[in-house]
Amino acid sequence: MTSVDTTSAPPSAGKTKGRWIDDWNPEDETFWNTTGRRVATRNLIFSIFAEHLGFSVWLLWSVVVVSLPAAGFEFSVDQLFWLVAVPNLVGSTLRLPYTFAVPRFGGRNWTVVSALLLAIPTTLLAIAVSNPSTPFWVFLLVAAAAGFGGGNFASSMTNISFFFPERSKGLGLGLNAAGGNLGTSVVQFGVPMAIAVGGGLSLANAGLMWLPLIAAAAICAWLFMDNLTVSKAPIKGQLGAAKRSHTWVMSFLYIGTFGSFVGYTAAYPLLAKTVFPDSSATKYAFLGAMLGSLIRPVGGWLADRVGGAKVTLWVFVVMVAGMMTMLVAVTSQSLALFMAAFAVLFGASGVGNGSTYRMIPAIFRTQGEREERAGVKNALAISLTEAGAAIGIISAIGAFGGFLIPRAYGSSLAATGSVATAVIAYAVFYAVCVAVTWWFYLRRQLLVARMPSMANATI
């Protein structure tokens, strides 16, 4: 093992063949100030680039489906909602293997591979939309391939979690996630312009426009990112996270925050066009995704200061109010209330994404410290590994909300002709999330009583 001189480390310090850094200790302030921050920031920048493209590709169909009828594809509204939902189902599932790929192959190496995989769904989309006789089942498979983009988030967040010290994880993870999440806004802003080039409807451009950027992201990751030896761990060690009850509690809460964000992002353009067909609401779809993305670091920042559980609890209270406003909007056919409700939901879910993700490493570190005090050997190091795996598991399960929300809207419309049933169900779900957050992380006589350090401002 090579070592890093924390006082005057040259750029190559601590590295072996293949850009692996053997010694990485961001908790040491001297190391962090002289070497760690610079390396972590560089990796964060190019991680964001690749993850940003992943989100763009993942949500690509949320924009494309709106133009399919005008391009001659005669699909029902329910079928269009399937095309919106299925990338989220596949992307959620892929997040588990993507998480385990980081300790197996290295964060930098996997970023290169995961970026290049994005060329598959974008190329297939360009081919599928070029022929109006392409059957629905082919579209469904092509939309499923966009799920490659959804997996990127889990591996990116797992990788970046190892680069930052505990005191800065909220901000570091928040910036990484926000930069990636912005891809949802960029795709909804840029694709409509790309397909309208020349005054016609060139749907193939929706896929082809990403190919040069995908190549650039892969090259940048190869040239400028690093692998961390500390992230390497056997799968058996990572699976320890699945035995922790907190992994599953936080997964449930993340369905309510991130699942809502990606679900609303995917569903909004088609939902707005369906409920308010004569309005121009779809033109502003990118604003909701932009709000939720940009405000995510605020959630991490607030969690660092006042406590992730407190922030998360109030996020769900606001989301209950947002859904009640949505119910009034769809029953009264008020476009203004509809857009206001979505703004509230996007903003609250964005803050909640940051606060819940900040809770994960803090919870696992607290567990590790408690077990180490009880005499468990290497408990703190094990907790770091488990936290990285938990981030992937939680992100995978939470992302299933991105599938459930569009499907609930589509099913509600097909069964009743209205989305009111789905809206009421969401309001009830968020109320349950309020109760779960309070029960597990704010009720002192339960977990906080057994884990005193969870009462501090970082949980």
Image: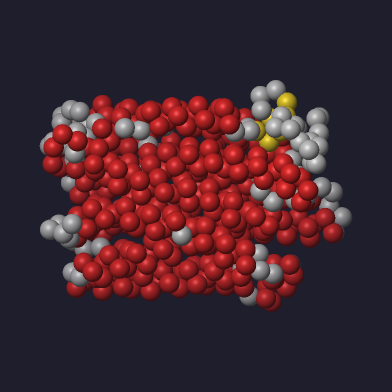
- Residue depicted at 19% across the width and 73% down the height: 332
Nearest the eye: 202 or 123: 202
The percent position of residue 116, horizontal first and vertical second, equals 46, 28
Q: Is residue 312 left or right of residue 325?
A: right
Nearest the eye: 14 or 336: 14
Q: Is residue 321 above or below residue 24?
A: below
- Most extreme residue toward the front is 8
Identify the image quadrant of the C terminus: bottom right
- Residue depicted at 57% across the width and 66% down the height: 302
Q: Is residue 374 left or right of residue 293?
A: right
Q: Is residue 110 above or below residue 30?
A: above
Q: Quadrant of residue 126?
A: top left
The percent position of residue 401, horizontal first and vertical second, equals 42, 54
The percent position of residue 139, horizontal first and vertical second, equals 27, 34
Q: Is residue 153 visible?
A: yes
- Residue depicted at 50% across the width and 27% down the height: 219
- Residue depicted at 32% across the width and 27% down the height: 123
Q: Is residue 425 visible?
A: no
Q: Is residue 240 left or right of residue 316?
A: right
Q: Quadrant of residue 204?
A: top left
Identify the image quadrant of the N terminus: top right
Q: Is residue 377 left or right of residue 217?
A: right
Tally the numbered discs.
Answer: 0
The percent position of residue 284, horizontal first and vertical second, equals 26, 56
Nearest the eye: 421 or 185: 185
Nearest the eye: 231 or 88: 231
- Most extreme residue toward the right is 375
